[in-house]
């Protein structure tokens, strides 16, 4: 079973990409600028809503490829769901902390 870590890693990253798609796509369709890797400075400056919709869709496509085209991801398999779920959880916490700094979501004294 030497191949097992490869699909699990892809599913972890797939969950991460799907999570990253959410704030960009939602901000974009709401017509709001949001941070993106294309802004200046990268990840801190604001990008247009159109750029964020495109970036969100790109992340969604990569997440789909990693989850649905690498290995045989099975929603009924606890190990498969845990791998993707950990990617979702870690990316969610990291982006919450990063964007919280920029949007007032991390109050002083809170971790």
Image (cartoon, rainbow, N blue to C red):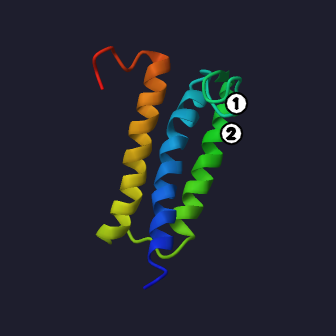
Q: Residues within 10 Å of mark 2 (few under 14, many from 20)?
A: some
- Which residue is labeled 2 in the image? 54
Say if mark 1 contacts mark 2, CB within 8 Å: yes
Q: Quadrant of the N terminus?
A: bottom left
Residue 26 in picture, x, y percent from top left: 53, 32
Residue 10 in picture, x, y percent from top left: 52, 64
Residue at image point 41% right, 58% down: 84
> For residue 105, what is the image quadrant?
top left
Residue at image point 47% right, 63% down: 11
Q: Quadrant of the C terminus?
A: top left
Determine the CA span between mark 1 and mark 2.
6 Å
**Is 92 on the left-hand or right-hand side of 14?**
left
Q: Residues within 10 Å of mark 1 (few under 14, many from 20)?
A: some
- Which residue is labeled 1 in the image? 50
- Tell which of 19 and 39 is nearer to you: 39
Q: Secondary structure at mark 2?
A: helix
Residue at image point 56% right, 25% down: 30
Which numbered marker is on residue 85?
Answer: none
**Is 47 on the left-hand or right-hand side of 85?**
right
Residue 36 in picture, x, y percent from top left: 63, 31
């Amino acid at each position: 079973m030497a191949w097992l870590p490869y699909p699990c890693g892809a599913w972890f990253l797939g969950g991460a990409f799907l999570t990253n798609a959410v704030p960009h796509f939602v901000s974009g369709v709401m017509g709001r600028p949001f941070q993106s890797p294309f802004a200046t400075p990268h990840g801190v400056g604001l990008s247009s809503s159109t750029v964020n919709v495109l970036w969100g869709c790109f992340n969604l496509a990569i997440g789909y490829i990693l989850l649905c085209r690498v290995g045989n991801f099975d929603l009924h398999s606890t190990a498969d769901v845990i791998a993707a779920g950990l990617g979702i959880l870690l990316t969610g916490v990291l982006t919450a902390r990063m964007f919280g700094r920029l949007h007032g979501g991390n109050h002083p004294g809170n971790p």
